[in-house]
Image (cartoon, rainbow, N blue to C red):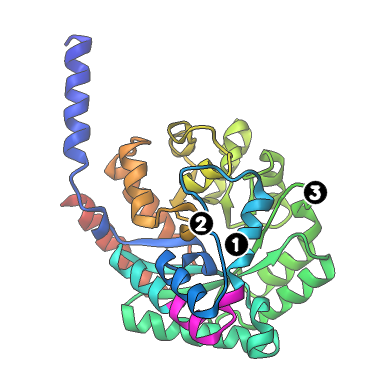
Amino acid sequence: MTDSATETTSTTIAAADSTRDLAKLPKGHLHLHMEAAIRAETLTAMCVAAGIEIELPDLTQTYSDFSAFSATYRSMLAVLVEPENLFRLIDESVEDAAREGVVYVEFGASPHFYIDTFGPVERALQIMIDTCAEAGAKWGVEIGLMITIDRTESVEVANAYAAVAAAFAGRGVVSLGLANDERGHPAEDFEEAFTIGRAAGLLSTPHAGELAGPEQVWKAVEVLGANRILHGVTSVEDPALMARLAADGVCLDVCPTSNLLLSVVGEIDAHPLRVLLDAGVRCSINADDPVLFGPNILSEYELCRSVLGLTDAQLAACAWSSIECGGGSAELKARSKLAIEEWLAS
């Protein structure tokens, strides 16, 4: 067979393989910060009603730096501290998830943002858990919370926050996260906090390997006992690390558009997701902060198919990782595994 004939055949196979409806692929959303799951039009309406000015980012441009992104994120809290607005955010974001084929959401949650609204952090967390449970029942989506430690805070604050998360393990909280700028705030500083979380049965799910190199992914695995790593894409720079992640089954919760707009990758078609998958690393596909980056999860799956060239088998594998590696129930995992297999066989 000639090279041109081989190329034509491969193109035909790829086209035939890309006809399945990605909205019908059962998937988990494991890397989704709650506040940034808000609809852009809802955020605008809330700001107008409150007389607050907020400038949403130009989604055709990258952020100037991570600090600019962080400041934009925190500016949303001015309207979300109103209870009705937070409740609306949760309900609408779960509705959006259900429409896009998401059967499990693991919200990155920061109840300390809401202590002025609801009182002590434990009360704020319980209200968030109850509201998520109500929305999940309404829209048919299972929900767990990832309590997110801010790595720019002190170790003492992190340990106290981990203790709160641990107290709610099995009662709506499923994982312990670590977010904000890696640079100058290494993972190993939070060893005690993650020891507390793991002892309570929480998944260890820190951010690592986004703004810093693979050395922080190593620390997340070896020091924090990571079950999943949010981002982790700089792991591609270290073959030994990719081999370790593959051997241990550590899942990377990857967010392609986020990586582009925060200049983790220079061009979207240079994103290392395919390289990671080819190395045997488990990956889930996620949107991170939809209102600040643009796409929601279904659009990210479509991008991974159309731009990164993932086959439907690879997309199904990512969907299964997003279910199996999350904090959902055993019943959800068993049901979703069958549904993913049926989708791929269709």
Q: Mark 2 points at which residue?
A: 292
Secondary structure under tag 3 reads loop
Q: Distance between the residues labelled 1 and 3?
A: 20 Å
Residue kind at label 3, given as amino acid type:
Gly
- At 49% across and 87% down in the image, what residue appears? 130
Q: Say which residue appears at 26% left-offset and 53% top-offset.
A: 22
Outermost residue, front direction? 51
Number of other residues with Cα within 10 Å of mark 2, as a class: few under 14, some 14 to 19, many 20 or more = many
Q: Which residue does the numbered mark 3 point to in the structure image?
A: 184
Q: Crowding at label 1, few (<14), some or many (≥20) Cα neighbours within 10 Å?
A: some
Apparent side of residue 98 relative to residue 271 in the rendered image (left or right): left
Q: Nearer the viewer, residue 163 or 118?
A: 118
The residue drawn where x is 30% and y is 63% is: 101
Give the left or right position of residue 186, taking residue 288 as reference.
Answer: right
- x and y percentages locating residue 41 in the rendered image: 40, 67
The percent position of residue 19, horizontal first and vertical second, equals 18, 45
Q: Does residue 291 show up magenta in the picture? A: no
Mark toward the start of the polypeptide (1 vs 2)? 1
Q: At numbered mark 2, what does the secondary structure look like: helix, strand or loop?
A: helix
Q: Quadrant of the N terminus?
A: top left
Q: Are marks 1 and 2 in contact (CB under 8 Å)?
A: yes
